[in-house]
Amino acid sequence: MNKPVNRRAFMKGLGMGTAALTTGVALPLTSCDSVAGKAVTYEGPILQIGDDIAIAETEYGKVKGFIMRGVYTFLGIPYGANTTGANRFMPPQKHEKWEGIRPAVFYGNSAPQNIYDRSSTSYGAFVDHWNYDEVSENCLTINVWTNALDNKKRPVIVWLHGGGFTSGNGIEQDGYHGENITRYGDVVYCSINHRLGAFGFADFSAVGGAKYKDSGNVGMLDMIAALQWVHDNIANFGGDPGNVTIIGQSGGGSKVCILSACPQAKGLIHKAVPLSGSSVSATSKETAQKLGEYILKEAKLQPSQIDKLQELSWREYLDLANRASATMRQETGIAGGFRPVADGVYLPTGTFFEEALPGSPDVPMMLCTTFHEQAPSRTNAELENITLEGVIERLQSRFGDKTATIVNAYARNFPNAKPVEVWSLITANRQNVIRAATMKKQQQSPVYLAWFGWCPPLFDGRMRAFHCLDICFWFLNTDLMLTHTGGGTRPRELSVKMADALLAFARTGNPNTPSLPQWPEFSVENVETMILDDTCEVKNDPDREGRSSFV
């Protein structure tokens, strides 16, 4: 088995080439690795799989994975039962125990959803090259990477994927992959699939009675079930159930915040890292129930017939529910959508952290967003030459009479930014993340804040620090996500610093590491922010003037 590696040697090793993995994910290491600064060549095969290799015990039975470059890998382990038929809209159920040894060698099914465009002309498909295979309601699975099946009690990191609450999966992009961070940091890394959209967050409590009382939050209950599985089983994979960090980006960041406000997660999570997504409240019960009524109406069913929704194919039901959501928006002006519900049981009816339900977690939190999130000129080079007046015109419909004030404030706050970058900074403004950090600060546990500003050279430098870019940096996957970073030494150097901070936070609840400048806790007064870029530095409220212009 390969031992945890020296950070400098590991950084060099990341550039040694690519090797194809049978799961379709390319990894940035060949048969050579580095340990304590010395080159090591695997004398045996890079991939190991066999009758007595990588076998672990779970509460449902034994699973067999494989060893890839020294990292034990288990893919698609069930943590709950199939959610189709009578289990649709119901809280997750335990999986049946199995006899013998179950293979765990390929990712589990993605939850029902509308898959992203993957046409040959799609720049989005080129940049993100989404990984999807089978889609079904039998989707409650977890992936696990670990350095050894022993009793070492390594910190556990659980990844919650993005895609809002309606799309995505645990390995939808290669930046989510767990092998590199596992090997480097000697942690146990997990990623999960769970129910999404109209399957995970359709509230039928008003029309379906007690049987359907939890239907609006079963997607969140899936995540709780996955975390419970981690608590009950991860020691068999060399992990510590008493030290679990949840991390997610975009919709996954919101999931991290929501779980951090959910009493049922207490004791199952110990640190939290939301990236480019944060929530301080859930959908109102009234709005969620109204959408449930619209779904029943779209299906032409009476409340007494609601069980018939469980008999539809997932495609029929998904299309029906999405039509109902569109109709509700058109008729009422309420954009309900499908997301967790403030029911007063699983989630507070008020603001998270301020009005926490009894027994809610109080865990250290590290929040990060990117400078630009959305880069208007990525596929439109003409916008590189837009003027501030042009930016004001483009944003007028969004900000109305305050547009010029906002644009000019950001231009003053960032005098070296081009007008198109001012545009990005405005649309990616930190209002929400500062609000989330401020609300979280009302609890006892520390809060840390980062802002990712590294820009790749791709698309003639027009991608900038866009939404999703930082993911692969946290997990040492910058050479896996070449279409995000361009690859090479420059992103690798920042990636190791960020991985060191994440690993320190996962171990202690404090991200400070010799790799970075001293990182102070966030305070409402100073808004201390770690800038993550080729040169990392701490600044106090670096966008204060621009952000204040929204008031």
Image (cartoon, grey):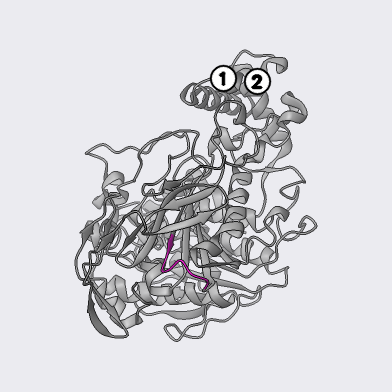
Question: Taking 259 as reference, is 152 above or below it?
Answer: below
Residue 205 figure quarter: top right
Q: Locate the C terminus by quadrant.
A: bottom right
Q: Looking at the image, which residue is at 22% across and 38% down?
A: 120
Q: Is residue 365 placed above or below 276 in the rendered structure?
A: below
Q: Position of residue 220 (x, y in %)?
A: 62, 46
Which numbered disc covers residue 311?
Answer: 1
Q: What amino acid type should be assigned to the residue bearing mark 2?
A: Asp
Against 349, residue 19 (above or below) is below
| Residue drawn at (59%, 55%) of the image | 227
Direction from residue 406 to residue 92 in the image, left or right:
right
Which residue shows up at 45% across the image and 86% down it?
A: 514
Left or right: 28, with 155 as reference point:
left
- Local secondary structure at mark 1: helix
- Quadrant location of the N terminus in the rendered image: bottom left
The picture places residue 489, in percent across and down from the top left corner, at 25, 74
Q: Residue at x 63, y 55 (%)?
A: 259
Task: State which quadrant residue 532 falls in.
Answer: bottom left
Give the residue at mark 2: 307
Question: Most extreme residue toward the right, as rendered?
Answer: 358
- List x then y, in percent, for residue 145: 42, 61
What residue occupies the far left of the structure in this picture?
A: 17
- Towards the viewer: 144 or 503: 144
Residue 176 - label: none
Residue 261 at x, y percent in the picture = 69, 56
Residue range highlighted in magenta: 145-151
C-alpha gap between disc 2 and disc 1: 7 Å
Dot 2 and dot 1 residues touching (CB under 8 Å): yes
Q: Residue 194: within the magenta?
A: no
Q: Circle 1: is it few (<14), some (14-19), or many (20+) Cα within 10 Å? A: some
